Amino acid sequence: MGIKRGTTLAAAAITVVLAATACGPGNDKAADTTKPVGAAAAAAAQDYGKGADNADGASGAKPAGQLAIASNDKVGPVLTDSAGMTLYRFDKDTAKPPKSNCDGDCEKTWPVVAAGDATAAAGMDPALLGEVVRTDGSKQLTVGGWPAYRYSKDAKAGDVNGQGVGGVWFALAADGKKAAKGAPAEGAPPAESAPPAQMAPPAAGGAAEADGKLSVAKDPKLGDHIVDGKGMTVYRFKPDTQWPMTSKCVGDCVAKWPVVAPVEKAKDKGIVEKNYTVLNRPDGQKQQSVDCWPVYTFTGDKKPGDVNGQGVGGTWYAVSPDGKLITVQ
């Protein structure tokens, strides 16, 4: 039926959409391999915006592509399409069996999501994706049995203008339930399917112990590099992306590479504070970024000055004061 279910938790990535973020495409060469993802999303968003007002039934429905779990300040984690547009469910529909009751004018305001192409979001159970045959014979994506829609009045990625409309329309969580602030299980993988380390407290020397500041230290080989409040080296993960800001370190990875907790800019010394933002991770942790790159520490560093994480796996590197990778060995 065209729905892709290849996403696994082992290869899961955490992607979030930040509200009012200053982050945008950067010039760091480390992002070159990931720029097509952001470009594709921007193009999809542009295409969606052109067609939303003229949606004319399921014949004009667009597929979701790569789904993502986005953090929203108003409603919590929500499910989005590849362009970052929020997906919704309708209380007058049914999930068992799946059935859509939105046709005609309803369908023009709430364009259906076609079932032709969808890939489960990172951390989402792929088995929750399905499809329902509509009265006109077209196929609509379902999540947990609930038919999925977009809202014509959502103009850009991250908008949730459809939340609560008429008391019957709600943003979808990754498990098919209604997105709800303060209910992390709605937008996170079920406890039994999530890697235990993903929900575990940050390891020693990690987010809980960043001591509220960053500074610059000097190393004979690395030169100037960022350290946390305890003097522990701060690292970047090469597979992460700057735009959209994405952490691909989850599960066992984040247990070895604890995220750096949000810090107070006023205390920082020598850090270039360009796009100095905080990433709201779906696992509940908040992660500091430098120039929109998520940053971490390494459990293999035992004392200030250690740089044992440098070059690990060809993907982990210390960070310069402007947020760039330091790739020297």
Image (spheres, helix red, strand yellow):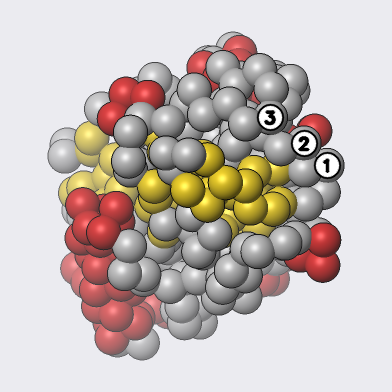
How far from the left and from the top, in percent, is residue 99? 43, 45
Q: Is residue 258 above or below residue 226?
A: above
CA neighbours of label 1 inside 10 A, class few (<14), some (14 to 19), many (20+): some
Label disc, if present, on residue 94 of the rendered structure: none
The residue that appears at 62% across and 47% down in the rendered structure is 217
Image quarter where the C terminus lies is top left
Mark positioned earlier in the residue sequence (2 or 3): 2
Q: Is residue 122 left or right of residue 173?
A: left
Q: Residue at x 44, y 42 (%)?
A: 222
Residues at circles 3 and 1 in contact by the CB criterion of under 8 Å:
no
- Residue beneath disc 2: 230
Label 1 and label 2: CA atoms lie apart by: 7 Å
Q: Picture coordinates of residue 224 (x, y %)?
A: 52, 52
Give above or below for 84 relative to 235.
below
Circle 1: residue type: Asp
Report if the CB atoms under discs 1 and 2 are less than 8 Å apart.
yes
Which of labels 3 and 1 is toward the front?
3
Distance in Å between CA atoms under marks 3 and 1? 13 Å
Q: Is residue 98 left or right of residue 239?
A: right
Per the image, label 1 sits on a secondary structure element best described as loop
Q: Closer to the camera: disc 2 or disc 3?
A: 3
The quarter of the image holding the N terminus is: top left
Image disc number at residue 304:
3
